[in-house]
Amino acid sequence: MRRDLHDLGWGAALALTGLAVAGYAWVSYDMGSLRRMGPGFFPVTLGMLLAGLGAVIAVPAMSRPGQSRPFAWPEIIAVVAALLVFGMLLDKLGVLLTTALTVLIASSVAPRGGLGWRLVLSVAVTALVWLVFVRGLNMSLPVWPGALR
């Protein structure tokens, strides 16, 4: 019987990544308490949630028959390119233009054609980023090109 190796492998990768993050944060940062959380509380919690999600994906895949699926190279390249563009251009273009460009790059390989919905998605995600990170959390991000932090 063939197992679902695709879900098994990626679920295990998620679980191991989550455990590594939680383990590193556990030994490197103070946990604090529930009333006064330390800097390690949030990364340990997120790492354990990621490990749990990986287990939820991997464990059922051990008994499920799998099928061969092609690797999604165009999608991987678009997502990695979008992340690289975001990291390299955030200080130069500001968070709003960089977010819009990143969404356009990441959505360029979507099976649905057309530029209209991509522009609407880009504007919506950019507005959400501005509301959450700039207005809500008051993070010191450059909003526009040349803006000071």
Image (cartoon, helix red, strand yellow):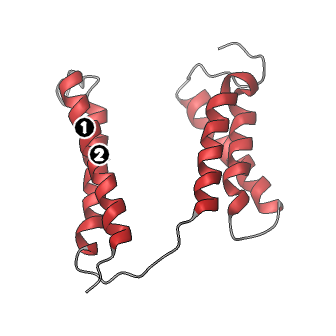
Q: Disc 2 vs disc 1: Cβ atoms closer than 8 Å?
A: yes
Quadrant, the C terminus:
top right
Q: Nearer the viewer, residue 109 or 73?
A: 73
Q: Nearer the viewer, residue 48 or 128?
A: 48
- Report the disc number at residue 38: none
Quadrant, the N terminus:
bottom left
Q: Is residue 70 above or below residue 149?
A: below
Q: Is residue 49 visible?
A: no
Q: Is residue 65 above or below residue 86?
A: below
Could you say whether the residue bearing mark 2 is in a helix, strand or loop? helix
Could you say whether the residue bearing mark 1 is in a helix, strand or loop? helix
Residue 101 image position (x, y, % from top left): 74, 42
Q: Could you tell me how far apart the alpha carbons at marks 2 and 1 are, in whole angstroms? A: 6 Å
User: Residue at coordinates 68% horizontally, 48% vertically from top-left?
Assistant: 103
User: Residue at coordinates 23% horizontally, 74% vertically from top-left?
Assistant: 62
Amino acid on which disc 2 is placed: Gly
Amino acid on which disc 1 is placed: Ala
Q: Is residue 132 above or below residue 147?
A: below
Rendering quarter of residue 57: bottom left
Q: Nearer the viewer, residue 131 or 99?
A: 99
Q: Nearer the viewer, residue 44 or 77?
A: 77
User: Residue at coordinates 71% horizontally, 54% vertically from top-left?
Assistant: 121
Residue 38 image position (x, y, % from top left): 25, 23
Q: Is residue 147 left or right of residue 132?
A: right
Outermost residue, bottom side: 1
For label 2, the residue is 18
Q: Is residue 136 left or right of residue 100?
A: left
Outermost residue, top side: 148
Rendering quarter of residue 88: top right
Tell me the crowding category of disc 1: few under 14, some 14 to 19, or many 20 or more residues within 10 angstroms, Cα based. many
Q: Is residue 46 left or right of residue 89?
A: left
For label 1, the residue is 22
